[in-house]
Image (cartoon, helix red, strand yellow):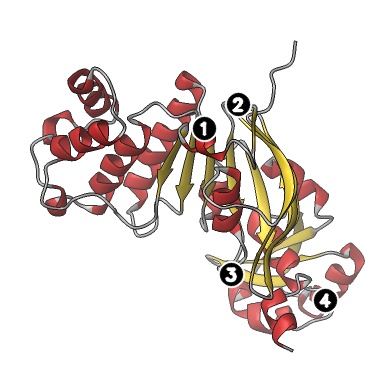
Amino acid sequence: MSQAPAIHVSGLTKRFGARTVVDNIELTVQPGRICGFLGPNGSGKTTTLRMICGLLIPDAGEGEVLGLDLRTQRHRIKQQIGYMTQKFGLFGDLTIRENLEFIARVYRLDRRDRRVDEALEKLGLTSRADQVAEKLSGGWKQRLALAAAVLHEPRILLLDEPTAGVDPQARREFWDQIHALAREDGMTVLVSTHYMDEAERCHEIAYIAYGVMLARGTTDEVIAGSGLHALSGEGPDADRLAAEIEQRPGVDMAAPFGTTLHVCGPDKAALNEAVRPWADRIRFTETEPTLEDVFIHLMKFAPDHSVLEQA
């Protein structure tokens, strides 16, 4: 017997004044899945997440979250949500333990001391439990914020660009922790990010541009569905040809990758024709498009509703 979706919404729409920030979004996420939300700034990612989690009321649309009605049972939905914002929002003058004890009181949790100890252990914070939060590095603040977000054992975890400004090692450790929460606790995770490597660590992704969902599925499904083709160029000064080749018809993007040149476009024949003038000294071979290629291609055809409504 198949498990009911953790999230199933359709027609989700949100307006602020005359501007439509989220336009007719549909989304289904199964329990224990990590769904990444990607898109340019101001495209409705955070607004979509907040509507799904009951923090904002949609102007149109319907659905269920954890089997609860998105409109009429928002309070019950919010009780089962963990929310970690991009900006550190805990108390800098309290220790790690004191911050978690405060959160436990806010949620009126039972077995507070035991829950705090378990959270400290699970996220590797025990050795720093008595350290003042404002003295922590970005990576350790991130761990503390995550511990606070999951202390009440939510079934859905909402992460809004959680690793912005954090070093690569801390980012990797953070994502290992997120996958452990999904795998071991069955937590459903919705995360907005600008990092392509983080998107590839999600079970599935949703790409939103100016309120409209343009792509949805696993990374492989999104790339395969894009219809894009890519070439890799190797040869003397191949990496220095990016700006010139990017202006050629049929080329969406040309970018240096070390000493090689990555070229991408929607039409295979046009792409080969675009690089033909350099074929005598640069060897171009077919390669796989990247997730970044897909998003650049999608952005070229995504209308900016904020511009349209001001026109």
C-alpha gap between disc 1 and disc 2: 17 Å
- Amino acid type at image mark 4: Ala
The residue labelled by disc 2 is: 31
Q: Nearer the viewer, mark 4 or mark 1?
A: 1
User: As displayed, is residue 298 above or below residue 184?
Assistant: below
Residue closest to the far right:
269
- Secondary structure beneath dot 4 equals helix
The answer to which image quadrant residue 83 occupies is top left
C-alpha gap between disc 4 and disc 1: 56 Å
The residue labelled by disc 1 is: 76
User: As displayed, is residue 98 above or below residue 162?
Assistant: above
Residue 274: which numbered mark, if any?
4
- Amino acid type at image mark 2: Pro
For disc 1, the neighbor class at 10 Å (few under 14, some 14 to 19, many from 20) is: some
- Secondary structure beneath dot 3 equals strand
- Amino acid type at image mark 1: Arg
- Amino acid type at image mark 3: Pro
The residue labelled by disc 3 is: 256
C-alpha gap between disc 4 and disc 3: 16 Å
Point out the tag, 4 or 3, that comes first from the N-terminus: 3
Residue closest to the far top:
1
C-alpha gap between disc 1 and disc 3: 50 Å
For disc 4, the neighbor class at 10 Å (few under 14, some 14 to 19, many from 20) is: many
Q: Nearer the viewer, residue 118 or 201?
A: 118
Q: Nearer the viewer, residue 36 or 105?
A: 105
